[in-house]
Amino acid sequence: MVIFVVEIKVSIIIPVYNAENFVENSINSVLCQTYSNIEIVIVNDGSTDKSQEICTKLLQKDKRIVLVNKTNEGAGKARFVGIQKSRGKYICFLDADDIMETCFVEKMVAALENNSADLVECGYCIFSEDLLKKHKVFEKNKIYNREQFKENVIANTIIDGKEAVVLWNKIYRKKLIDQYVQIYAANVLEDYLFNMQYYLGVEKYVYLNEELIKYRATEDSLSRKYNPELVSELKKILPLKEQYMEKYCMNDSKYQKKHAMWYLNYIYNYLKSGIMYQGFVQRTKSVIKDPVTISAAHKVPEHFWAKDINRGWYNVCVIKLYVSGIGFWIKRRLYQIKKLL
């Protein structure tokens, strides 16, 4: 008797942590895909609510689900566990509160295979109870070779951060993940690090100008949450990024300016989100007097914040940040109050 084993084409990895209110809808959006040759690898990252119970119930209903339970280490490590457990030729990621359109996998696989691409990306919708906003990376479909990908995608994501670097609107080849992507002990920018490494293996890129993912905007995603470790974690990433720019021959003055802009914007948002935490003034002055910050400010003197740093007007920097941060805090509080009404 001959037994035929069907090769799994696509593994969809879902890290789950305390997502009891949304995870069932997210998983059901995957189970309803028009493309059926999939496996769903759910990694329960030490949830303390009913998430594990919900996932176990769904596991019993569909054999395509694989459930992995682990201690809490963060979404980045949970995704890597999912990759290790996956058997698919291609990999997709989904957050536990987001939704896939039913044709997501079918259209993404077709775009990948019909164009012999290494990476396919699509548009998405940002949604909440009172928000629905379409987000397009480009205004029409794109097919890029390696050089075009470097100039139009890498330059605007990895180097200067104009476009968000996320995982959940893409499909990847697992063999390239295995070849290029390593896990790093960083607690921030996990999606950024993953894509930065994967992009080294991309010879052909396709963009589908369709919103095939619904990204749920929560309180934390609508406003940057304060992370006291961000600057120290960012400094761990800087050498990796600089090596990356050298590999891609993107270390001339044009790209150095983009890189400096990326760094200044990150630390500005970090400091702004921490105005209500103890030590704001001291923390802000420490960061803006740091040699890395001063070097970045010299490279982009036209940056709205760099002008004051280059003049040594540190108190002005603090005041401007505080005023901007108050607006940020009020916006967040209004959102919280609105949720309670």
Image: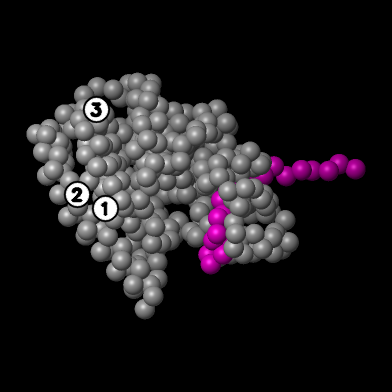
Rendering coords of residue 112 (x, y %): 50, 41
Say if mark 2 contacts mark 1, CB within 8 Å.
Answer: yes
Give the residues in magenta.
1-23
The mark total stands at 3
Is residue 201 placed above or below 267 in the rendered structure?
A: above
User: What number is the disc on residue 275?
Assistant: 1
C-alpha separation, residue under disc 2 versus residue under disc 1: 8 Å
Rendering coords of residue 139 (x, y %): 30, 50
What amino acid type should be assigned to the residue bearing mark 2? Answer: Leu
Q: Is residue 4 left or right of residue 307?
A: right
What amino acid type should be assigned to the residue bearing mark 3? Answer: Pro
Residue 332 appears in the rendering = yes
Residue assigned mark 2: 321
Is residue 341 placed above or below 182 in the rendered structure?
A: below
On the rendered image, what quadrant is the N terminus found in?
top right
**Magenta-highlighted stretch: main secondary structure?**
loop
| Element class at badge 1 | loop
